[in-house]
Each structure stands twice: as structure tokens, then as C-alpha cells.
Image (cartoon, rainbow, N blue to C red):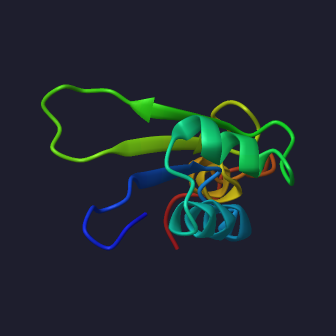
Amino acid sequence: MNGNVPGPILVVNPADDEVFGIVAEVLVDRGASSTAELQRQLRRRYDRAVVHARELSSEPFVIWYVYRDGLWVNSRRDLDRRSPDPPAPNRPSPPDGP
């Protein structure tokens, strides 16, 4: 993008794929000025990549959703955070008192 106009804010999915996020940012920095152009360039390396603009009329900035796998997927970090502790093995409860 040029130095006078800020580029889009990229919301990259999966969020924990740092390489994918960097590739998307670099492509925008090097001139991908539309969602279609960014998607076309990303698909050279990520064949299922999809880019959509968030279109809310009251927002003063541009946000693009960039999906590596063509749709929203949970990141590994999200799955780790959501996973409950594994159930404890069935053991008899300790007796009350000392």
C-alpha cells in the first residue's frame, strides 16, 4: 500500500500460523490492493486461501479476513486453551479425616 493510506487490518486464520500471517502482510505491503488480488497471490502457495472484506458502513478502517484453509478453523492454541483437563481415573475417594 502507499505511504499515505493505511493498508487493511488483516484478521488471519488460523491465528497461530505465523508464517501464513507474515506472507499475507508482505503481499499487502508489496501491493496487493484488493481482496481478490491478495487471494490470487496467496493461492500460489496456499491453494485454498480465501480473503473477504468486512463491510460495516460505520467503520473508519478496512478489515480483511484471510483464511488459509478457505474457512474458519480453530487454531492449535484455541484448542489447547479450550480442552478441559482430562478426567481423573476412577479411584475411590479418600476417607474423611486424618
Asked if 71 appears above or below 22 in the picture, the reply is above
Asked if 25 appears above or below 87 in the picture, the reply is below
Q: Residue at x 56, y 51 (%)?
A: 12
Q: Nearer the viewer, residue 50 or 79?
A: 50
Q: Is residue 9 among what the camera can see?
A: yes
Q: Residue at x 58, y 68 (%)?
A: 30
Q: Residue at x 27, y 61 (%)?
A: 5
Q: Position of residue 25 (x, y in %)?
A: 56, 65
Q: Position of residue 52 (x, y in %)?
A: 52, 32
Q: Position of residue 62 (x, y in %)?
A: 31, 45
Q: Residue at x 59, y 56 (%)?
A: 15
Asked where in the image residue 26 lies, by quadrant, the reply is: bottom right
Q: Position of residue 64 (x, y in %)?
A: 45, 42
Q: Nearer the viewer, residue 25 or 36?
A: 36
Q: Nearer the viewer, residue 66 or 86?
A: 66
Asked if 30 appears above or below 44 in the picture, the reply is below
Asked if 77 appears above or below 36 in the picture, the reply is below
Q: Is residue 40 left or right of residue 62?
A: right
Q: Nearer the viewer, residue 15 or 50?
A: 50
Q: Is residue 1 left or right of residue 51?
A: left
Q: Is residue 74 among what the camera can see?
A: no
